[in-house]
Image (tube, rainbow, N blue to C red):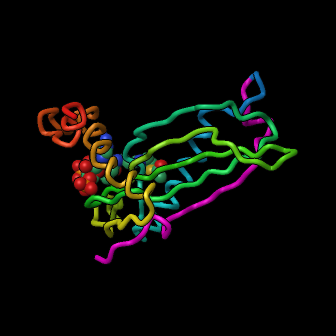
Amino acid sequence: MEAKHPQDSRTVMTDLVLPSETNPLKNLFGGELLARMDRAASIAARRHSRRIVVTVSVNHVAFKKTVPLGSVVTVEASISRAFNSSMEVVIDVWIEDRESGIRSRANDAIYTFVAVDESGSPVPVPPIEPQTDLEKERFDAALRRKQLSLVLAGKMKPQEATELKALFME
Ligand SMILES: CC(=O)SCCNC(=O)CCNC(=O)[C@H](O)C(C)(C)COP(=O)(O)OP(=O)(O)OC[C@H]1O[C@@H](n2cnc3c(N)ncnc32)[C@H](O)[C@@H]1OP(=O)(O)O
């Protein structure tokens, strides 16, 4: 299968924060942001694989900043690395200052999706060829994150997680 670039799957979704999506402090609910990120990541995974995709794991989420009612929120997702049937999706969330228009990062996350056929069985996806320094950095770290996720899910023995172990040996 021919390799694709992270840019090929880049998905950008911009939307407002409405009153029904906020907590008593009038900030965006974490679950609402998780859902927006899942939707953007799912589109990115579909663009990369051109298959049906399902979320298999939410590997990392950091709620760095509150997102106030009325904010303009942009969720950007792209594939950082593809394995056999699984794809790591990196998601950045930005909010826009109403007056200056300057964007600041509110959140980031890493989800893993799997491409499946009509009966839900995993199918292979194209590999990723990173181009920029940031894409290369994310690509290199993705195997460690996959191994950590599999160890935490009880699907890999810690002693088999060679890339992950190497991180602690450095
Ligand atoms: C868009 C949505 O929100 S969809 C709704 C939420 N998601 C779902 O309903 C998915 C439910 N889960 C499933 O259907 C199945 O578990 C599947 C299809 C995802 C995987 O099926 P399995 O029989 O576990 O397949 P298998 O063990 O071969 O794993 C498939 C791939 O997922 C990877 N994987 C499985 N679990 C994890 C995990 N916790 N973290 C990271 N990767 C994982 C495997 O390493 C494998 O990757 P590879 O093929 O690239 O090497």
Question: Relative to residue 170, is residue 37 drawn left or right?
Answer: right
- Determine the residue positioned at 29% across, 45% down: 146
Which residue extends farthest right?
Answer: 99
- Determine the residue positioned at 63% across, 42% down: 105
- Determine the residue positioned at 28% across, 43% down: 144
Q: Pinpoint residue 24: horizontal percent, then vertical percent.
A: 76, 22
Q: Pinpoint residue 52: horizontal percent, then vertical percent.
A: 42, 64
The reply to whether residue 121 is in sight is no
Which residue extends farthest bottom?
Answer: 2
Numbered range of the magenta stretch? 1-23
Q: Pinpoint residue 70: horizontal percent, then vertical percent.
A: 82, 40
The reply to whether residue 117 is in sight is yes
Which residue extends farthest left?
Answer: 159
85 is within the stretch colored magenta:
no
In the image, residue 91 sits, relative to residue 8, either above or below, namely above
7 is within the stretch colored magenta:
yes
In the image, residue 163 sits, relative to residue 158, either above or below, namely below
**Residue 131 lies in quadrant:** bottom left
Question: Relative to residue 69, is residue 74 drawn left or right?
Answer: left
Q: Which of 9 and 31 lies nearest the eye of the viewer?
A: 9
- Image quadrant containing the C terminus: top left
In the image, residue 83 sits, relative to residue 146, either above or below, namely below
Q: Which of 37 and 65 lies nearest the eye of the viewer?
A: 65
**Residue 35 lies in quadrant:** top right
**Residue 153 lies in quadrant:** top left
- Determine the residue positioned at 38% across, 52% down: 137
